[in-house]
Amino acid sequence: MPAPQCASCHKARAALRRPRSGLALCGACFCAAFEAEVLHTVVAGRLLPPGAVVAVGASGGKDSTVLAHVLRELAPRLGISLQLVAVDEGIGGYRDAALAAVRRQAARWELPLTVHGRLGRSRSCCTFCGVLRRRALEEGARLVGATHVVTGHNADDMAETVLMNFLRGDAGRLARGGGLGSPGEGGALPRCRPLQLASQKEVVLYAHFRRLDYFSEECVYAPEAFRGHARDLLKLLEAARPSAVLDLVHSAERLALAPAARPPPAGACSRCGALASRALCQACALLDGLDRGRPRLAIGKGRRGRDEVGPRGLRRSGSGSNPQPGKPFLLFPPSRDPSSPLGRL
């Protein structure tokens, strides 16, 4: 059966059918619609004011690459300037290749790039990596004079996070999980997620149609992460109910906790001054556990360890890896090239 005509331009043949609207669009019209939706998210949410210096968390993966490309296209309309900030976690056989992709992107787009940190080659894995990478990104953003930080978390990432917090019974993180970012409490830079309402499948398709160069290998420690269980569960939910991903994202925005379940007001970390719900922020608590030679207790393995370290909820979180995307929806025609992004979907 031949592909239908594009429902937008009525000229080209459709290349995909969008899952949310069901519209059959050609590649060019899909990319234009994707960029318009990101622009609407940024403007409606007042995420990036004119004149903002925006640090883009660049990992070299599909999400951060798509985010940087879209914001570069929208920068003149938004009145913002961009800085790429990458964090070197020191993961052998993984991060070096990803950073090479980031450097190629920076050169191609003529955007300034700063590589910050080197978190060490440790098997402490995803909890340490996630918490310390967040701190390193904040420090790198300040080094380049940024006023805002953006990350490439998409709708699937956020739905997985909501599921993980439910499965762990983490009321504190559920209470803080809504919205498109954080306004910058406690002296931290404001953060936002312009791709939060974009599905992972559409992020991959946008990268394909724009011919973006990105690193797609999974982190070697990703199989150890708890996020993988939430990801598998989300795929089953999405197969039964296609809107499950966005439903979970919006549920976090509307979540209301009973007064007894609400976390205490956040204060300042007694060591570094960062925003914290306990005496020590997550990063300082993890570093404290490492200094004492008890890193597993810093992660939260065992009640005694949690009581000693202080902060609640320091459990294993997901890595920032790029998962293998699921099958796309009604591509016209389907890709037969296994080396292409669509061929691997």
Image (tube, rainbow, N blue to C red):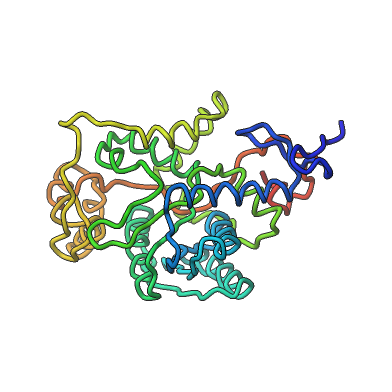
Q: Residue furthest right?
A: 2
Residue at (32% x, 32% y) in the render: 255
From the viewer's perspective, tell me whether residue 71 is left or right of residue 26. Answer: left
Total numbered circles: 0
Residue 316 in view of the camera: yes
Q: Work out which quarter of the rendered image holds the N terminus and state it.
A: top right
Whole-percent x, y for residue 69 in the image: 59, 61
Residue 294 in view of the camera: no
From the viewer's perspective, tell me whether residue 125 is left or right of residue 18. Answer: left
Whole-percent x, y for residue 260 in the image: 15, 31
From the viewer's perspective, tell me whether residue 332 is left or right of residue 298. Answer: right
Residue 325, quarter of picture: top right
Whole-percent x, y for residue 38 in the image: 54, 50
Residue 23, quarter of picture: top right
Q: Nearer the viewer, residue 276 or 25?
A: 25
Whole-percent x, y for residue 59 in the image: 50, 62
Q: Work out which quarter of the rendered image holds the C terminus and state it.
A: top right
From the viewer's perspective, tell me whether residue 342 is left or right of residue 5. Answer: left
State whether residue 217 is above or below residue 265. Answer: below
Residue at (45% x, 51% y) in the render: 193
